[in-house]
Image (cartoon, grey):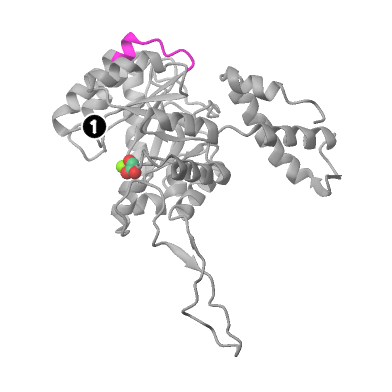
Amino acid sequence: MSGSRSAKDFFRPLAVGAPAPLTEIPARPSRAIHFFDPSNPKMAAKIPDMVGKVDVLLGNLEDAIKADNKTAAREGLVTIAQETDFGPTQLWTRINSLDSPWVLDDLTTLVPAIGDKLDVIMVPKVQGAEDIHYVDRLLAQLEAKAGLGRPILIHAILETARGVANVEEICAASPRMQGLSLGPADLAADRRMKTTRVGGGHPGYLVRQDPPKNELGVADINATRTTYQQDLWHYTIARMVDACAMNGIYPYYGPFGDIADEVACEDQFRNAFLLGCVGTWSLHPKQIAIANRVFSPSVEDVAHARRVAAAMGDGTGAVMLDGKMEDDASLKQCLVMVELAEQLAAIDPELKAQYDAIEVGA
Ligand code: GLV
Ligand code: MG
């Protein structure tokens, strides 16, 4: 691609003394990215108790934090990070957007103070590779100055029309790229979609069954016809999944704003999981349970996947199981499930017990 670094330079640090970029992004479980407001003392007080109970805790500095609280949120995050041992739980932050008056202070404060604790920095409203290049270089300079031993990764929120148009180049812009989240609220506004919600569907976005024909063979357009609500986010999620997969990074759903509607939240999360996403955001503790349930393969799927793997032996050829043909390609799908189950079992004892209880050959 014109303007990109040559293959041999791509993994060189962008500042003298900065840690070497990773050549592979580790697949750390991140089913729920739980957002908290570090300027809210009540929320901050709950963080130590959440360690080990959620895959990712994210100190939010951007939207939903009032302008008057931006400094308090940044300082609150520093204090929480310094005082908390996060154990197996990752610590992420969402910085302010690159055109805001706060983002430079966000980065120059957080990296020296808590860069050793921060796993991933989520960058909102990313428009193109140039946004990633800016943060990439700045992080390298700050990491070198702070003497950090490992690079902080970047996660981009896809929430502008231009960002979606540039999604492949965004994913490929830096070895720091860890993944993408959908930002349905900002994206809807930027695209001038006619919705007023944060994520989820809309009853007006539907397809309707054809009219039945009457005895004369004439279409009866007044007959009752079934409608099926469609997924507003299918196109964007599908593009994100392909862009992430081709670059070895991870796609996520994003916020689901109707906290009370746990059923629709679960459906939306599951669509994303089935299409290839590895996790989602949680805006309320009860969404953590939904995300953990949805983004962990079911015991039935893991049992089936292991059975196919056992039956396929060296992985070539085809076998019949329960009347269905299994071959190299269905085995590969099953191995995705088995691998994910192993990664999750390593950090989630409850899941491990469930997966371990599956009988071999069951
Ligand atoms: C998230 O940031 C969104 O805009 O949906
Ligand atoms: Mg947004």
Q: Helix, strand, or loop for circle 1? A: helix
Q: Residue at x 53, y 70 (%)?
A: 209
247 is higher (above) or lower (below) than 139: below
Residue 206 vertical placement versus 284 (above, below)? below
Residue 6 spot, x, y in % from top left: 49, 39
Q: Amino acid at mark 1?
A: Val
**Residue at image location 44% in from the left, 48% down from the top:** 167
Answer with left or right where residue 331 lies relative to residue 235. Answer: right
Label 1 lies in ligand 2 vicinity (Cβ under 8 Å): no
Quarter of the image with the C terminus in it: top right
Q: Residues within 10 Å of mark 1 (few under 14, many from 20)?
A: some
Q: Nearer the viewer, residue 260 or 77?
A: 260
Residue closer to the observer: 353 or 154: 353
Can you see residue 4?
Answer: no
Residue plotted at (57% across, 78% down): 212
Image: 114 above or below 217: above
Residue matched to label 1: 103
Residue 119 at x, y = what percent? 42, 22
Instruction: Choose top left, top right, bottom left or bottom right for residue 332.
Output: top right
Quadrant of the image where one finds ligand 2 = top left
Does residue 100 appear left or right of residue 123 in this picture?
A: left
Which region of the structure is painted magenta? 80-88
Residue 333, quarter of the rendered image:
top right
